C-alpha cells in the first residue's frame, strides 16, 4: 500500500508494543466493506478511499507518512467515539 513504510512501522511497533492495538484497530476501521467477497480476500481499504485519506493526511496521493505519524493518528483515532 503506497504511503506506508511497512518495515519502518513494524520496527516502530516493536519498540512501542503498547501501540499495536491502536494501529490494528485503525487498520480494521479502514477496511473495505465486503472485503471477503473480492480477491485478495484481505481486509484492505478501497483504493479510492485510501487515496482520499492520503490526500487529506499528506496533501498528495503519493504522500508518505512516517511510522510515528501513522501511530499517532491511530492512537488519536482509537480515542475517538466515531467508528463504523
Image (cartoon, rainbow, N blue to C red):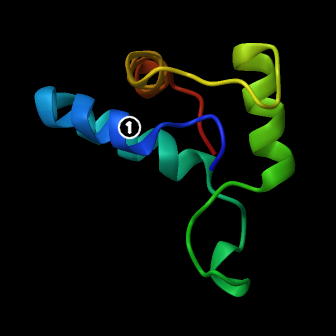
Q: Is residue 13 left or right of residue 33?
A: left
Who is closer to the viewer here, 50 or 66? Answer: 66
The correct choice, above or below, for 13 with respect to 80 in the image is below
Taking the spot 80% from the left edge, 53% from the top edge, the residue there is 47
Query: x%, y% of residue 36?
Result: 63, 81
Taking the spot 35% from the left edge, 35% from the top edge, the residue there is 9
Query: x%, y% of residue 40?
Result: 63, 81
Give the number of callouts: 1
Q: Is residue 26 left or right of residue 35?
A: left
Who is closer to the viewer here, 67 or 83? Answer: 67
Answer with the quarter of the image where residue 45 lies. Answer: bottom right
Taking the spot 47% from the left edge, 37% from the top edge, the residue there is 5
Pointer 1 local density, CA inside 10 Å: few below 14, some 14–19, many at least 20? many
Residue annotated with mark 1: 23
Taking the spot 81% from the left edge, 38% from the top edge, the residue there is 51
Query: x%, y% of residue 64?
Result: 62, 24
Amino acid at each position: 500500500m503506497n504511503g506506508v513504510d511497512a518495515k519502518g512501522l513494524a520496527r516502530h511497533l516493536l519498540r512501542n508494543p503498547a501501540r499495536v492495538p491502536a494501529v490494528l484497530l485503525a487498520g480494521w476501521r479502514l477496511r473495505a466493506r465486503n472485503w471477503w467477497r473480492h480477491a485478495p480476500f484481505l481486509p484492505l481499504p478501497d483504493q479510492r478511499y485510501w487515496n482520499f485519506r492520503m490526500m487529506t493526511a499528506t496533501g498528495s496521493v503519493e504522500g508518505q507518512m512516517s511510522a510515528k505519524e501513522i501511530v499517532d493518528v491511530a492512537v488519536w483515532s482509537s480515542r475517538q467515539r466515531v467508528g463504523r
